[in-house]
Amino acid sequence: MQRSRQLPIRAALAAALIVFALGQARSPVFHKKTYHLELEAYPAAPFPYFSRFGTVTLHVYSGGVSADSFWLTGFSRNGTKTVTIMNPVARMYTDMPLSEITSLVSSRSSNDPLADTPPPVEGPIAGRVGALRASRYRLMYGPAAWIDVWTTTDVPESAQLRAIVDSLVRGISPPTASVTHGIPGTPVYVELNFRRFKKVPFLKLKKLTWSNAGETDALRVGSYYMKAPLIDAVWR
């Protein structure tokens, strides 16, 4: 009997990261309403090493993207080519160019199936995630290995979210990035289904409000922060 192809744990995590780029390649849909999309990510679900981050809350606004975790916070405004990373405990921050993110991820990527073989995509299947209309796309890595990605077009697409995650995806697997570009919509739910991870949520919709309250503070460096000369000072 032919053995089912299994995806290594590191590849599973890397594959999960690509979902933030899904649907961001098409021309953005312009909406008159301001909005605040909150998503919860669980990076430790497939990879316990990332438990130091805890639950990561992503805040997507019309003007940019911010993220909060137990350890670090960060933001990136629309049209910029950097991500500002802040350490609330040390009160330090640094700006990382998107190109450096690609190089950093690429240097740490392993030679696993994800790096060389783009997955076929099945779907869409129509449904709902909360009150949002959504479509399910399934990234297939084997007969018993896949990632379910639910996206919606009810929420405006974020060009800055696309820019950030495209930098990650290019570092992990350019072939995979080229496949996922064809999937429309904004991701609102992602579930991992592998041998060791059955129906494990990686990304969940937390809340959507049609207001930009809090956007200004979320997309700027906090008070009394000092700029770190090296990123290592922020990562400590």
Image (spheres, grey):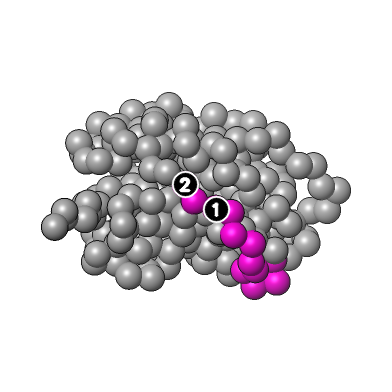
Q: Residue at x 38, y 70 (%)?
A: 199
Give residue 160's position: percent from left, percent from top: 60, 39
Point out the stretch of residues depicted in magenta.
121-132
Q: Residues within 10 Å of mark 1 (few under 14, many from 20)?
A: few
**Residue drawn at the location 64% of the way across and 72% of the way down:** 130
Residue 121 — which label? 2
- Residue farthest left in this picture: 1
Observer able to see residue 59: no
Q: Residues within 10 Å of mark 2 (few under 14, many from 20)?
A: some
* Residue denoted by label 1: 123
Q: Amino acid at mark 2?
A: Val
Residue displayed at 52% across by 66% down: 204
- Residue at coordinates 64% horizontally, 49% vertically from top-left? 185
Q: Toward which corner of the image does residue 38 lie, by quadrant?
A: bottom right
Which secondary structure is most common in the magenta stretch? strand
Q: Foreground residue, 146 or 213?
A: 146
Residue type at mark 1 is: Gly
Residue 152 location (% of width, % of height): 65, 56
Q: Are marks 1 and 2 in contact (CB under 8 Å)?
A: yes
State the SS at label 2. strand
Gap in angstroms between the C-alphas marked 1 and 2: 7 Å
